[in-house]
C-alpha cells in the first residue's frame, strides 16, 4: 500500500481564518482521463456538498453524495464503484477508507487535500514529503474541476512510476534466481554454464513454465537431494 | 532545568480511555510546570491525526504504537520520519462479540455457557455452519490497519487455526463500533476503552478477552513527533516527554485514576459516562451485563513495572511490532532499512530527559 505522490499549491491572496477544514480525495488507479469519472462525495455539510456538485455539473465528473456514511460505507463503495472519493477529512469514516486496499479489490488512494489554513510552511512540507496536494482556501467552485483534473493526471503518473519500479525489482529478483539455479546445476551436475542454462530453458519450454519458476523448482529439488 | 525553544504546542489525541496521560498532563498542570502551553486537539480519525502531524498542523500526537514505523516506512501514507521518545501506555484493548454471535457459539458447541477469556477455537463450528448454510462470514472490526488491535485479533484467531479467509476483518472508527454491533453489521470488534465497556453496559455484547490475554505488555500508544521538529527544538521535546512521564507517574494511584475518569467523561474529552471509563482504569474488565467483571490488574498500564519503566521506547518493543507488520503482509514490497527501529524508537531522548529532569525512571 502506498500513497500517491502529488503536489499542487494554490495560494490565496486574502488572509484566511485560522480554521482547518480539509477534504481528502481518493482516486481509483484505473481511471482514464477521457472517461466519465464517478465521484463519491462524503460530507455532512450539505451546503458544501451541493456547491461541489453544482460546480461539477456538465463535466465528466459524476457526483454521488452520501451524507452520513458511518455505516454501510464500504457497501456503498462496492455498489457505486467510484473513481474518486472526496471525503471531509474531519469525518471519522476516513479510517474506513484507509483499509480499502486490504479488504477490497478496489484500490482507491488518497491524493488531494483541500485545507482552509494558510500555513505556507506546512504546505511546503507536505509537498516536499510528497504527501498530497494541498489546496488553501475555500473550495471555490471554479477551482474544483481543474484540481480534480490535476489530481487524476498526477495520480496516473505516480502509479506508472510505481508500477515500473515494482517491475524492475521483480525482474532483478528473477534474474538473480535463475543465476543461482544455474550455478547450482553447474556444480551438482557438472555442467558448463551454457549447458546449464540451455537445460533450464528447455524444461521451461517443454512444460510451458516461466524460466523463473523452473529455477525455483530446481533449487528446491537440488537442495533437498 | 530544561528551557523549551517552542512553548506553544498543538498536541493531537483520539478520545479513548488511554489518552489519560495527555489529559492528566494538561489538567494537572504538568505541561505548564515544564514551561509548555499545550492545546490538546481532539481528532476524529487516526489517518487525519497522522496527516496533520506529517504536515505540521500538529506538533506531536498520541499514536498507535505501529504508526510511527508505518509513517517512517511510508506505508499507507507518504514517507515521513516520525520518532517516538516515550511509550504512553501498555495493553488497554479488548475483543467484544455481539449477543447474537455469543448465542451462536453456545448453540454450535452445545454449551450452556462460555468461560473467559474466550477460546478462539469455539468460533470454528460457527464458521463451518455459516459456510454450509451459505450465510456471510463472521465479520470483525478493528480501528486501523497499522494497529495492535488488528494484529491482536489476527493472533487470537491464528492461535486457533482460524485462517484470514475464514472471517472478514474491516476497519470501523471507534465511535461507530457499538452502533454497528447493534445493527448487526459487525459480529465483534477489537477496540480500546471505553468502547468495550460501553457495549457491555448497553447489553449489546460480551467482552470475550482483553488484549492482555493475547499479548503481554506490548506498547499500545506512544508519543509521536516529526524527527526534523525534534532537531529544531530538542528541549521542547524533552520538556514534553518529561511532562507526560510525570502524568504517567501521577496515574499510578487509584484515587487519581478515578479523578481522571471523571475529568475525561466531559464533552471536551471522551463525552462518555464515568461508569464506562473508570472500570478499565482500575483494572476491571466488564464482561456481560449479568456477569461479574474480570480482574485484569494491568488492563491500562501507564507506568509501573518492576524493575524499570514501561515508558522507555526500547528497540526490542519496536522489533516486535515490526515483526507483526511483517506477518500481516504489510511490509511486502516495502523497502525496510535494517535500522528502521533504531531510527524510530528513541530511548536516547528518553534517557536525556531522565538525566536533565531528575524525574524518577
Image (tube, coloured by chain):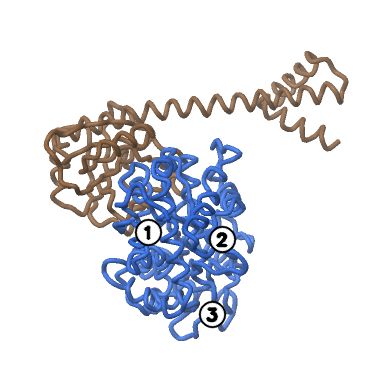
Chain colours: A brown, B blue
Q: Chain of mark 1?
A: B
Tell me the distance, in whole angstroms, between the alpha carbons under discs 3 and 1.
36 Å
Between tags 1 and 2, which lies in front?
Answer: 1
Tell me the distance, in whole angstroms, between the alpha carbons under discs 3 and 2.
19 Å
Position of residue B10 relative to residue B230, above or below, is below
Residue at image position (21%, 43%) is A117
Residue B232, quarter of the rendered image = top left
Mark 3: few/some/many CA within 10 Å (<14, 14-19, 20+): some
Position of residue B95 relative to residue A10, above or below, is below
Q: Chain of mark 2?
A: B
Mark 1: few/some/many CA within 10 Å (<14, 14-19, 20+): many
Q: Tell me the quadrant of the picture where the C terminus of chain A can be found.
A: top right
Q: Is residue B239 at least partly visible in the picture?
A: yes
Identify the residue under disc 1.
Answer: B34
Residue at image position (21%, 38%) is A136
Q: Chain of mark 3?
A: B
Amino acid at each position: 500500500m502506498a500513497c500517491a505522490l502529488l503536489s499542487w499549491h494554490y495560494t490565496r491572496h486574502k488572509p484566511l481564518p485560522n480554521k482547518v477544514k480539509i477534504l481528502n480525495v481518493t482516486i481509483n488507479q484505473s481511471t482514464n482521463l477521457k472517461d466519465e469519472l464517478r465521484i463519491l462525495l462524503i460530507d455532512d455539510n450539505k451546503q458544501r456538498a451541493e456547491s461541489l456538485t453544482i460546480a461539477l455539473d456538465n463535466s465528466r465528473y459524476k457526483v454521488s453524495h452520501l451524507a452520513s456514511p458511518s455505516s454501510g460505507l464500504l457497501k456503498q463503495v462496492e455498489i457505486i464503484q467510484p473513481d474518486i472519493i472526496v471525503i471531509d477529512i474531519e469525518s471519522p469514516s476516513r479510517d474506513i477508507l484507509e483499509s480499502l486496499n486490504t479488504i477490497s479489490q478496489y484500490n482507491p488512494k488518497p491524493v488531494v487535500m483541500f485545507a482552509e489554513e494558510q500555513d505556507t510552511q506546512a504546505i511546503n512540507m507536505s509537498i516536499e514529503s510528497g504527501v498530497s496536494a494541498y489546496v488553501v482556501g475555500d473550495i471555490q467552485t471554479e477551482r474544483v474541476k481543474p484540481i480534480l483534473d490535476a489530481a487524476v493526471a498526477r495520480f496516473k503518473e505516480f502509479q506508472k512510476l510505481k508500477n515500473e519500479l515494482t517491475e524492475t525489482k521483480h525482474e532483478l529478483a528473477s534474474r538473480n534466481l535463475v543465476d543461482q539455479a544455474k550455478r547450482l546445476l553447474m556444480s551438482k551436475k557438472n555442467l558448463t554454464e551454457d549447458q546449464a542454462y540451455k537445460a533450464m530453458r528447455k524444461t521451461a519450454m517443454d512444460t510451458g513454465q516461466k524460466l523463473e519458476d523452473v529455477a525455483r523448482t530446481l533449487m528446491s529439488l537440488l537442495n533437498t537431494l | 532545568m530544561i528551557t523549551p525553544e517552542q512553548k506553544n504546542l498543538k498536541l493531537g489525541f483520539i478520545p479513548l480511555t488511554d489518552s489519560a496521560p495527555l489529559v492528566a498532563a494538561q489538567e494537572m498542570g504538568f505541561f505548564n510546570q515544564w514551561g509548555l502551553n499545550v492545546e490538546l486537539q481532539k481528532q476524529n480519525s487516526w489517518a487525519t491525526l497522522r496527516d496533520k502531524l506529517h504536515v505540521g498542523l500538529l506538533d506531536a500526537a498520541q499514536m498507535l504504537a505501529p504508526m510511527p514505523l508505518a509513517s517512517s516506512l511510508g506505508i499507507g501514507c507518504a514517507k515521513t520520519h516520525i520518532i517516538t521518545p516515550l511509550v504512553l501506555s501498555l495493553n488497554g484493548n479488548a475483543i467484544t462479540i455481539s449477543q447474537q454471535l455469543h448465542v451462536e457459539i453456545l448453540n454450535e458447541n452445545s454449551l450452556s455457557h462460555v468461560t473467559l477469556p474466550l477460546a478462539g477455537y469455539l468460533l470454528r463450528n460457527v464458521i463451518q455452519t455459516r459456510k454450509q448454510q451459505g450465510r456471510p462470514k463472521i465479520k470483525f472490526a478493528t480501528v486501523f490497519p497499522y494497529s495492535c488491535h488488528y494484529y491482536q485479533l489476527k493472533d487470537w484467531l491464528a492461535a486457533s487455526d482460524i485462517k484470514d479467509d475464514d472471517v472478514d476483518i474491516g476497519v470501523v472508527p471507534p465511535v461507530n463500533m457499538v452502533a454497528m454491533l447493534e445493527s448487526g453489521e459487525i459480529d465483534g470488534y477489537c477496540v480500546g476503552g471505553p468502547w468495550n465497556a460501553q457495549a457491555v453496559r448497553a447489553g449489546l455484547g460480551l467482552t470475550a478477552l482483553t488484549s492482555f490475554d493475547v499479548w503481554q505488555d506490548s506498547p499500545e500508544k506512544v508519543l509521536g513527533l516529526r524527527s526534523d521538529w525534534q532537531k529544531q527544538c530538542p528541549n521542547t521535546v524533552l520538556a514534553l516527554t518529561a511532562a507526560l512521564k510525570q502524568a504517567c507517574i501521577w496515574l499510578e494511584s487509584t484515587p487519581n485514576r478515578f479523578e481522571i475518569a471523571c475529568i475525561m467523561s466531559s464533552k471536551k474529552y471522551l463525552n462518555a459516562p464515568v461508569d464506562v471509563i473508570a472500570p478499565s482504569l482500575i483494572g476491571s474488565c466488564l464482561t456481560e451485563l449479568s456477569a461479574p467483571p474480570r480482574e485484569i490488574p494491568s488492563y491500562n498500564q501507564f507506568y509501573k513495572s518492576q524493575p524499570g519503566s514501561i515508558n522507555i521506547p526500547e528497540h526490542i518493543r519496536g522489533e516486535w511490532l515490526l515483526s507483526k507488520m511483517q506477518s500481516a503482509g504489510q511490509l511486502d514490497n516495502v523497502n525496510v532499512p535494517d535500522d528502521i527501529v533504531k531510527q524510530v524508537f528513541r530511548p536516547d531522548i528518553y534517557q536525556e530527559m531522565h538525566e536533565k529532569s531528575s524525574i524518577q525512571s
